[in-house]
Image: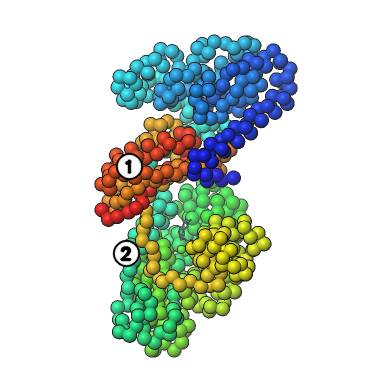
Amino acid sequence: AAHTSSSLGDFAQYLTNKKRKLQDLDLNLKENDSFGAADVSADQLFRGCSIYVNGYTSPSISVLHRLVVLHGGRFCQYMDSKTSITHIVASSLTPKKHIEFNSYRVVRPEWIVESIDAGRLLPWHNFRTVPNSESQLVFDDRRNNSAINIQQRSSSEYVAQQIKELENQPHNNDSASCHIGTSSISRTLDVDFVRQYYSQSRLHHLSTWKAELRKRYQNLILNHVTPKSQTISKMGRRNSNQKQNIRVIFHVDFDCFFASVAVKLNPQFNGKPLCVGNGGTLNSEIASCNYEARKFGVKNGMWMHQAKKLCSNLVCLPYQFEEYERVSSHLYNVLLDCGADRIEAVSIDEALVDLTTACTNDDAIDIQSKALSISQNIRRRIYQLSGCTVSVGIGDNILQSKIATKLAKPDGQYYITAKESLDIIGSMDITDLPGVGYSTGALLKQHLPSINKIRDVRAVSLSSLKQILGEKTGIKIHRSSFGIDDREVGEVSARKSVGVEINWGVRLSTFDEVQKFIRSLATELFQRLQQLNITGKTLTLKVQNRAPDAPIDPPKYLGCGDCISYSRSASFSDESFSINDICNLSLNLILKMPVIVQDIRGIGLQITKLSNA
Ligand code: DCP
Ligand code: CA
Ligand code: CA
């Protein structure tokens, strides 16, 4: 289960429960293990010892856990109560851990195994992970000139050996014994990681494009011919022939956008099932697949291994970010020049256009045929310029036009009547509620389990909907269930935050690395603020921490897996903050979170309470 607790209290409770569960498990283990029962004399060998295992060990952490518990010791899953831990078992230590564990008895796993063999507790200092003199040396280094010496030491034989050990560690080993995969370390430590990540991340591109396009087309009123008598809409300008409240909204969306661009650049795959994704490894996600692939049941967002099962000869091609921008610009240029009243950028491959005036003109015979002929034109011109097809949905409002697009796809157009859209919306599953997230639909299902389709929502009173979903969402869902949507095209709310977030490829092993990672995020964030000419008052730090029962290596390669997410905010002393200020504030915030360095799977920084710089 996903845990999204944000408060410390909840997490403390979670930990307490979890620990209780583990202790029960320990008891069970002890009672049921015949090996333990047979060796009664050794039973209390580790009595009074509280043992914590750090990093990769041989035998694995789960074996050590068993051995410690069977022989009367306490096994600590977490380092939360440092003082109660008597021994840390580690095969090797990172320089940072050297310091962090300086006041502990840090022993090699052999101490456990050989003590059991000997039938008595062997002196721990004969099994030091770090020979005494070395540990002392590091400590002195730290007192004298802090981090620099630790860095220098990383060339020492000791650390070299440690790295070698890590490198020899197999990737998909027993997950409990494999704390950090090598390639993940190098990825996260890579100085250019953040920059590289952003140049390769499609989600980052999608959100940046969206922000830029929105900014460009926000408040752009295209039809400047305004009859004096007309002030029908608060934003749009309407033609005098327009009947009150009638609107003609177009939704224009590229068909399988990334996949279309891929086929355009690789025409040899024309007509073959194809998708675009990250390298096509089995553990990657499909960003876009063409309609030939969809015939096999392949879908956008599906995992590659699943898609390959459905369609074994599915071709996977790489992203072409620059080409997406080029193709998209043709869409926007055509829409800027089609006689529209208003235009709204929805995303790189999709826009809303208010064509009320053009469709209700004096020379328009009837709205539907006029709209369909304008649409035909738009589609033809976009295809001529870009070589990719769009589909167009037309309706009385934004919601209806988006539903019409679903009926138009691929390479088609559809004019939907109010009655028709009402039927279609009614037959949709509530988790597909248009304009609201999946979670709202799920929440509704939880409170009203008998409700399945959106048409059932119509029977629920507005007051109950408000009670379940809150005032705003309640009203919104009530209205959308009846196909009502009075948003104006281009009426997008102003930007409320600027942020950066990485939750892929994040595997850190020391606090030093956390600091470095935060610094690169802060640098990226700072550059964005500068580009947008924006500053703000408040910083929010979000950290994704591996959920205790989630596997160390999630199914998605280097993904974040099941996480508990923490979020904390603080304000800058003034709005002219620097990269350093962002770092310092972030570090203050992360220290207040009960996160474990090795379990961090994602970090995000966000600035809110924005103002112009
Ligand atoms: N995209 C992505 N990841 C997402 C959503 C979108 O990479 N979670 C990218 C790939 C898509 C493009 O954005 O090609 C446009 O998204 P659409 O939802 O419009 O999907 P397609 O254009 O691929 O298909 P359709 O024909 O259904 O619109
Ligand atoms: Ca699309
Ligand atoms: Ca789209």
The residue at label 1 has a CB less than 8 Å from ligand 1: no
**What type is the residue that disc 2 sits on?**
Arg
- Is the residue marked 2 within 8 Å of ligand 3, measured from its CB? no
Picture layout, residue 500 above or below residue 236: above
Residue corresponding to mark 1: 582
Residue 345 on image: x %, y %? 39, 65
Q: Quadrant of residue 237?
A: bottom left
Which residue in the protein does label 2 denote? 216
Relative image position of residue 533 (x, y in whole percent): 27, 54
Label 2 packing within 10 angstroms: few (<14), some (14-19), many (20+): few
Callout 1 amino acid: Ile
Judging depth in this view, the residue of 55 and 532 nearest the camera is 532
Which badge, 2 or 1, is on the more N-terminal residue? 2
36 displayed left or right of 55: right
Check the picture and name the quadrant holding the N terminus: top right
Q: Nearer the viewer, residue 237 or 401?
A: 237
- Is residue 8 placed above or below 140 in the rendered structure? below
Q: Position of residue 172 (x, y in %)?
A: 55, 35
